[in-house]
């Protein structure tokens, strides 16, 4: 299988904090990889380096190579904006644009960039919402405010907004941690379907979730990659003692 | 036991009374000013007041139309230049500011807004009036603009900082460049707060007299151009009030009334916008 994203000896610093230490991972195309580990171990930091969100923090420093389709996204001359169009991101708390309608939220990526073609908008909205299984629930109130949706619906809307701009990779940072169990289940089912088209990297501190949705799992501890491999293997016969302790709930 | 409850109640009443007194002490002068200005100015408010320029001394009637237009023109010109500088400066501070540069800008803005306005007028005088060899509306507008910029800059910055970072990240993660995100998401979410700041800045300079004294100078007639002396309401109030003529005094009061009503309206509108929720 093709490796869509590849981290090669990645180190990330915030000023004096060394948040991610010498991490190398392969993310195969059209698969779901879960990054697990206790709170504060650097999962979000690692994830956000893959679409260059750290560029916004002057104190953040990313070293090593991060390859998408074989080319380093931190190379000189690479525009972070073009990377973010290929590598989308879903955040922990649903964050639809509060004054936009459901409809406008889906095409926000086009509207904010001033490149919406009117005749294509309806199509994009319908396809994207169908793909996140939200179409039936909202098709009669597309022009109403997105904040009227439930938390779970808002999160699916945010996923729709992300896939509307046709990314290749989707990063998810604990996308269900703010949701109720039923909404969580829907998001998990969705991830299962999305991997047919996208490469998905999901951060979660919920191990059952990692076991349910992912093909591969990477266990991060204090900024270091402890172990990484097929999810089945990590959860049944981990090689490292630390991994076993963590997944059996002995710490974290 | 009983005594301590009674004592607590007494203390409670005492404090309430004190606070009521303090509130009254704040409101009373305001009310006094307002009532007095209305009483003195209302009789001279006529159609003439809004359409005529001042009559030569000795003639009855006349108005302050030239002053009102002059104030509008100079505040307009000051806003045209000052508001974009203030707003884009604030965007720079919040979104792009490398720490050194933004600290310097913030410091400059704070010093500038703490500077007495007569000094701002003097600066405009020596930088514009002297080299251009004459008083001008443009110099007046520049002085007003210098007062507006730091106010707008700091209020806008405060408002931009209150926009949740999650919204900016949502936009950036969709591949929207930072500058577009700043304008279309951050600034737009803060629109109502930014408008409040703008209105307060306008209200502030609408009443400024000192910076216009040796820049726009004032004019008994319609201003000819931006490069000639121009009348303004506060200047006219000043000149008329210190004149020895009874009817000019009445015009000054009418001018004061107009100014107070305008500022009152601006402040109320500002409050209205300030109450709106953040939206985009
Ligand atoms: N913007 C930042 N500035 C400074 N330190 C940060 C920043 N973001 C994260 N960190 C630090 O990096 C470490 C890892 O944080 P994070 O990646 O958020 O952990 P996780 O997502 O696994 O809970 C923490 O010690 C945190 O304090
Ligand atoms: Mg995190």
Image (cartoon, coloured by chain):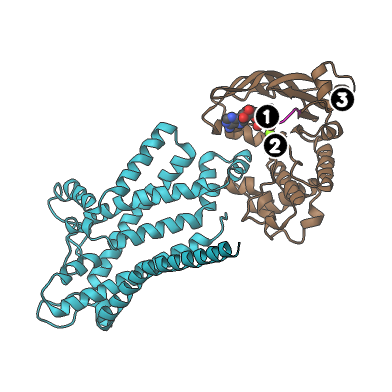
Chain colours: A brown, B cyan
* Magenta-tinted stretch: A36-45
Badge 3 sits on which subunit?
A
Which is nearer the eye, B276 or B187? B276
In the rendered image, the vertical position of residue A117 relative to residue A247, given as above or below: below
- Considering every residue shown, the one lying at the far right of the view is A236
Does the magenta segment cover residue A126? no
Label whose residue precedes the other's in the sequence (2 or 1): 1
Instruction: From the image, give the main secondary structure of the stretch colored magenta.
Output: loop
What is the x, y in percent for residue A240?
82, 16
2 or 1: mark nearer the eye? 1
Query: For the residue with label 1, is its CB less than 8 Å from the closest atom of ligand 1?
Result: yes
Can residue B200 be seen from the camera position used here? yes
Return the residue at label 1.
A40
Return the residue at label 2.
A167
**Quadrant of the image containing the C terminus of chain B:** bottom right
The residue positioned 63% from the left and 35% from the top of the image is A84
Q: Residues within 10 Å of mark 2 (few under 14, many from 20)?
A: many
Which is nearer the eye, A250 or B160? A250
């Amino acid at each position: 299988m093709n490796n869509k994203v590849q981290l090669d000896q990645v180190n990330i610093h915030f000023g004096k904090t060394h948040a991610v230490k010498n991490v190398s991972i392969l993310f195969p195309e059209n698969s779901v990889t879960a990054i697990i580990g206790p709170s504060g171990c650097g999962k979000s930091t690692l994830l956000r380096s893959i679409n260059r969100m750290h560029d916004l923090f002057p104190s953040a420093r990313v070293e090593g190579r991060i390859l998408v389709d074989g080319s380093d996204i931190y190379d000189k001359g690479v525009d972070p904006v073009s990377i973010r169009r290929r590598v989308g991101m879903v955040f922990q708390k649903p964050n639809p644009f509060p004054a936009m309608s459901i409809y406008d939220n889906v095409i926000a990526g086009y509207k904010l960039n001033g490149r919406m073609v009117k005749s294509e908008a309806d199509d994009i909205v319908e396809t994207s919402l169908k793909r996140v299984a939200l179409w039936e629930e909202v098709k009669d109130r597309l022009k109403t405010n997105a904040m009227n949706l439930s938390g779970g619906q808002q999160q699916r809307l945010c996923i729709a907004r992300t896939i509307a701009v046709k990314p290749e990779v989707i990063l998810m940072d604990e996308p269900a941690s703010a949701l109720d169990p039923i909404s969580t289940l829907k998001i998990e089912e969705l991830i299962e379907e999305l991997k047919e088209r996208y490469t998905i990297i999901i951060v979660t501190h919920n191990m059952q979730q990692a076991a349910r949705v992912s093909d591969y799992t990477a266990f991060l501890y204090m900024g270091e990659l402890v172990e990484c491999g097929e999810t089945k293997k990590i959860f049944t016969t981990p090689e490292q003692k630390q991994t076993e302790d963590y997944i059996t709930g002995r710490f974290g | 036991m009983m005594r301590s409850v009674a004592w607590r109640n007494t203390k409670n009443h005492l404090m309430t009374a004190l606070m009521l007194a303090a509130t009254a002490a704040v409101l009373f002068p305001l009310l006094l000013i307002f009532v007095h200005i209305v009483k003195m100015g209302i009789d001279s408010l006529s159609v003439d007041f809004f359409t005529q320029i001042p009559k030569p001394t000795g003639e009855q009637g006349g108005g302050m139309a030239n002053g009102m237009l002059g104030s509008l023109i100079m505040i307009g010109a000051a806003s045209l230049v000052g508001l974009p500088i203030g707003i884009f400066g604030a965007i720079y501070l919040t979104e792009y500011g490398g720490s050194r540069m933004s600290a310097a800008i913030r410091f400059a803005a704070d010093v500038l807004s703490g500077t007495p306005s007569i000094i701002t007028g003097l600066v405009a005088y020596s930088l514009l009036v002297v080299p251009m060899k004459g008083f001008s509306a443009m110099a007046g507008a520049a002085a007003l603009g210098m007062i507006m910029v730091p106010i707008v800059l700091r209020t806008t910055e405060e408002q931009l900082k209150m926009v949740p970072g999650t919204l900016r990240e949502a936009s950036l993660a969709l591949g929207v460049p930072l500058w577009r995100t700043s304008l279309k998401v951050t600034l737009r979410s803060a629109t109502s707060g930014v408008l409040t700041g703008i209105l307060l800045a306008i209200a502030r300079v609408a009443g400024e007299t000192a910076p216009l004294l040796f820049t726009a100078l004032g004019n008994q007639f319609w201003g000819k151009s931006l490069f000639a002396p121009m009348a303004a309401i506060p200047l006219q109030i000043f000149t008329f009030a210190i004149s020895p003529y009874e009817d000019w005094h009445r015009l000054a009061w009418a001018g004061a009334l107009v100014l107070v009503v305008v500022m009152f309206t601006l402040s109320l509108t500002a409050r209205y916008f300030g109450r709106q929720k953040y939206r985009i």
